[in-house]
Image: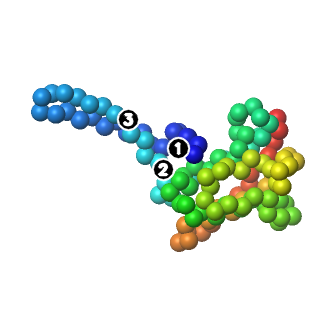
Amino acid sequence: MFNRPHFYRSYTVTVTDDNGCVFKRDVFVPLVDGCIFIAELISPNGDGANDTWFIGGLEGYANAKVQVLSRWGQIVFESTGYSTPWDGKYQNEYLPPADYYFVVQYDEERDPITGVVTIAYE
């Protein structure tokens, strides 16, 4: 699983016992409960920045359905859950730079999230 602590809320918990001993610990709570972040850009050029498409907040939705479509409506990526982020490939080949359209259905009681993700190689 990938670690994205900036999509978690951080709390510092402090416990003091009867002897005055203090224990502090930072706790990270995922922003789930409808707080979904979907990156608008992927640049799969191997530089380690934005090489895969990040969707934050789906960790609590194991049955989430994610689709990415070309401008002609062809499905170029599809998954149930999002444990392996999309790397900008279709049939093991990198897609050309362009806008692609996505549909994320993470909760059957909510409307799907739709939008555009752009592939750029700069």
Label for residue 26? Answer: 3
| Residue at the farthest bottom position | 109
**Residue shown at the point (71%, 50%) measured from the top left:** 86
Amino acid under disc 3: Asp
| Disc 3 secondary structure class | strand
* Residue 11 horizontal/vertical position (percent): 37, 39
**Residue shown at the point (30%, 31%) measured from the top left:** 24
Label for residue 86? Answer: none
Label for residue 31? Answer: 2
| Disc 2 secondary structure class | loop
Counting residues from the start of the chain, the first of labels 1 and 3 encountered is 1
Amino acid under disc 1: Phe
Disc 1 to disc 3, C-alpha distance: 15 Å
Disc 2 to disc 3, C-alpha distance: 16 Å
Residue 112 higher or lower than 86, as above or below: below
Counting residues from the start of the chain, the first of labels 2 and 1 encountered is 1
* Residue 37 horizontal/vertical position (percent): 59, 50
Residue 117 is left or right of residue 110, and the answer is right
**Residue shown at the point (53%, 72%) measured from the top left:** 109
- Which quarter of the rendered picture does the N terminus lie within? top right
Q: Which residue is mark 1?
A: 7
Locate residue 66: give its quadrant. bottom right
Nearer to me, 83 or 49? 83
- Which quarter of the rendered picture does the C terminus lie within? top right
